[in-house]
Amino acid sequence: MWGQPTLVVDSVNDQAPTAETNKSGKNVAEQPYSAPANGKGIIRAVLPLWPPE
Amino acid sequence: MYHTANPAPPKYFDEKYESGKTLSKQYRSLTTYSIQLQIEDDGKFLSVRRFPSSDAILDAGYTPPFDSAWELAKGIGGQAFLGMDPTIPPRMKAEATRYSPGEKSSLSQIVLPGADWQNRGIIPLDYSSIKVNPGEVILGHSLIKFRVGSEGDYISVVAMMAPAHMPWVWCEATVAYKDNNLILYAAGSAFPCHAFYVAGRQLARLDLSTNLSTLRDVFTRGLPAKIK
């Protein structure tokens, strides 16, 4: 069969981010994503399926 | 990380995933899936499907036990001295002597073809940071956002007085196809090492630094500030 819809596989055992309060009673902020690794950006690697003729 | 460092990722990863056993729990997160590809003799893309009966895995990994009993003694001793939350010393001991499961964000997802053959690729998640080259067929996309588990986060915030929750780390990969080539795109946030495998072979690594001395500095004193 052709053209079946793609499947989004959801994560299992999902947990919402925790929200703790520190000793001073102040809400503790979530940190944003950390920065990309050393500015190396996106890797693009090629794997030939068989050696070229 | 400094006192819970993992061994370097292996060159080959071709074992069948088994929760709690794979890589002896020596990883901070892991995603894996299997797809099947049909191409014509000249390398033209024909169709793709999710490999029958295969599982797509999004695993938030583990924080290993401390490699030094002295670090644990310092932490527990410090807490006893400060007379803070009495639950902290036993929590620290538990955290320092076991493989502690990590936490995974609900943004973590894998997008794959359906179970039947389809003659087009998949559409990646909207929040992907990866753009593939024109003409490449996207076969699969995975993104995991993870961090240390709730116990480690509690200790960090309550005992160590961290001003923020433990940071999230993300790792993303897309596999595409064109002209007889599988093409891996990979990206990730600052972290000691991300490793990417295609057909069981490590095809790429993204290292914060390959200099162990630099890594030790980063994970004991933090990243150096950039002063202009």
Image (spheres, coloured by chain):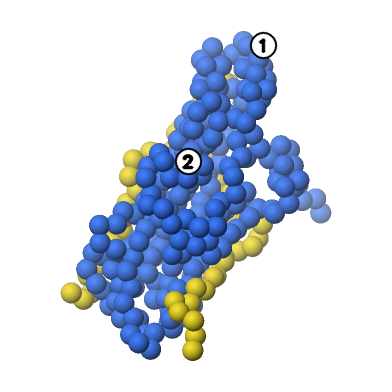
Image disc number at residue B24: 2
Q: Amino acid at mark 1?
A: Phe
Tell me the tag on residue B81: 1
Question: The disc numbered 1 marks a residue on which chain?
Answer: B
Q: Is residue B127 visible?
A: no
- Specify the quadrant that holds the C terminus of chain B: bottom right
Instruction: Where is residue A26? Give x, y as percent.
Output: 55, 26
Q: Residue at x 39, y 76 (%)?
A: B137
Tell me the quadrant of the picture where the N terminus of chain B can be found: top right
Q: Describe residue B163's horizontal placement relative to residue B26 as left or right.
A: right
- For label 2, the crowd category at 10 Å Cα-Cα, with few meaning under 14, some 14 to 19 and many 20 or more, is few
> Residue B54, located in which quarter of the rendered image?
bottom left
Chain A color in figure: yellow
Q: CA distance from mark 1 to mark 2?
A: 36 Å
Q: Secondary structure at mark 1?
A: helix
Taking A37 as reference, is B95 above or below it?
Answer: above
